Image (tube, rainbow, N blue to C red):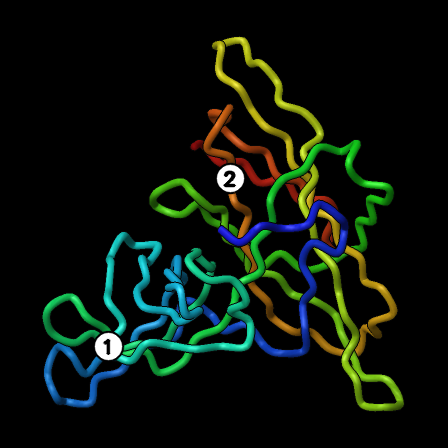
Amino acid sequence: MKRLSSSIFLCLLSSVFFLSCEADNYEKGEGRYSLLLADFADLTVNSEKVGVSFLTDEGENFLISNPQKASWIQTADTIYRAYLYYNKIENGKARVTSMGSLPTLKPRDAKEFKRQPQDPLGLESSWLTRDGKYINLGLLLKNGRDDNGKEGTHALSIVCDEVRQNDDQTQTAYYRLLHDQGKAPEYYTNRRYACILLPTEQRPDSVCLTVNTYDGVVVKKFKL
């Protein structure tokens, strides 16, 4: 996964909308391969910075019949977190119609942060991926445009406050979502998606995630 900065500006959410992974499928009447699908996935990028295959959160692996270039692909021979709209075609291949980058947050120790803003936001959904690699977040961010027509910019990150030993000898990691509203006005609500990359080494048995929302503090628990 692309290396991420440990600062609070680890993840900048731009004015480009992130698309829902639960977009409605449709049937054109052309058979099983006419379905337009939308998924979160790990996108494999080759030495030429081109997306050539992807593994969906449902565990399906596809070769891309029309290899994809994008301005946000900056590193060769790596894996990016992305959302993709695509059609399945024969022999394990897919034709991608559009794709975008998904902000990916890596938990950092609290001492690594000089600031820990927890401005409120909306938490629409949260779920653990089937392979237990990520926690996906559906967020609702308040935003607006300034006199120059520019939309405000938010910043997100994840702090790990502690990993606690439980009475049954399991371990629970306690995470907090940090959110900096910055100078973004709060005129309307935008839906955004982000992912938490869970540790593979010294992996906890469960995660307790705290999010400060407009309706108060919300705690979500995930068994890994």
Does dot 1 land on a helix, a strand or a loop? strand
The residue depicted at 50 percent of the width and 29 percent of the height is: 206
Say what secondary structure mark 2 lies in: loop
Q: Residue at x 47, y 59 (%)?
A: 81
Query: From where the camera sits, is residue 160 visible?
Result: yes
Q: How many marks?
A: 2
Would you call the spot at circle 1 few (<14 residues within 10 Å), some (14-19), or many (20 or more)?
some
Q: Earlier in the sequence, mark 2 or mark 1?
A: 1
User: Residue at the front extreme?
Assistant: 47
In the image, taking residue 122 as reference, residue 185 lies left or right, namely right
Query: In terms of depth relative to the viewer, which is nearer, 66 or 85?
Result: 66
Q: Amino acid at mark 1?
A: Ser
**Cα distance, mark 2 to mark 1?**
30 Å
Q: Nearer the viewer, residue 213 or 194?
A: 194
Write the residue at 65% across / 36% down: 175
Q: Residue 179 location in percent, x, y?
A: 75, 54
Q: Mark 1 = which residue?
A: 65
- Residue 198 is labelled as 2
Residue 11 falls left or right of residue 197: right
Q: Position of residue 31 (x, y in %)?
A: 10, 83
In the displayed structure image, the side of residue 206 where residue 85 appears, left or right: left
Name the residue nearer the viewer: 76 or 95.
76
Inspect the image, locate mark 2, and give the three-letter code of the amino acid beneath it.
Leu
